[in-house]
Image: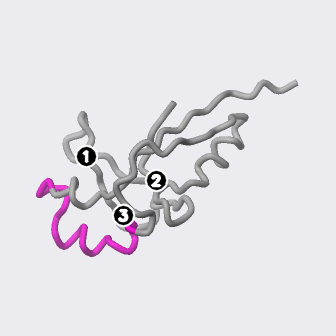
Amino acid sequence: MFTVPIKEAGETRDRRNLPHVHHPAPFVKDGALVTYEYGFDICDIADKYFMKTEYEMTNMFHKPENTTDLVKEYSNYHANNVFVNNGSIQFYRYNVICFTSQKITMK
């Protein structure tokens, strides 16, 4: 069972070659670097590694098209110094989605 922020309006995007964005992390002073923005294709990605992954939307606070898109909203993130000014709670708009993966035994 796991949770990750999901960009509901698109597929997973690799951020390693894009401007850096950090999100709050309890044990990392400067925040954790966001390397991927996951989409609902995360189930397909996990399934490639011999898993059967499903999800359940547990709390829907935002319409999918209103969830945070870090590429489109990077200038807002950067200009308002979101991470440093602790505005991340207002900036990151995600719904609560619980994922479960079960290992598939190969025969």
Nearest the eye: 46 or 95: 95
Task: Tell me which numbered mark, 3 or 2, is placed earlier along the sequence.
Answer: 2
Residue at the disc numbered 3: 68
Q: What is the x, y in percent for residue 103?
A: 68, 27
- Label 1, secondary structure: give it: strand
Q: Amino acid at mark 1?
A: Pro
Residue drawn at point x = 23 percent, y = 69 percent: 78
Residue at the disc numbered 1: 24
Left or right for 104, reference 24 = right
Residue drawn at point x = 62 percent, y = 46 percent: 43
Task: Kindly report the distance in space between the C-alpha atoms of the residues bearing marks 1 and 2.
Answer: 16 Å
Q: Amino acid at mark 2?
A: Ile
Nearest the eye: 79 or 66: 66
Residue 85 on the magenta segment: yes
- Label 3, secondary structure: give it: loop
Q: What is the x, y in percent for residue 30?
A: 21, 47
Secondary structure of the magenta portion, mostly? loop
Task: Kindly report the distance in space between the C-alpha atoms of the residues bearing marks 3 and 2.
Answer: 9 Å
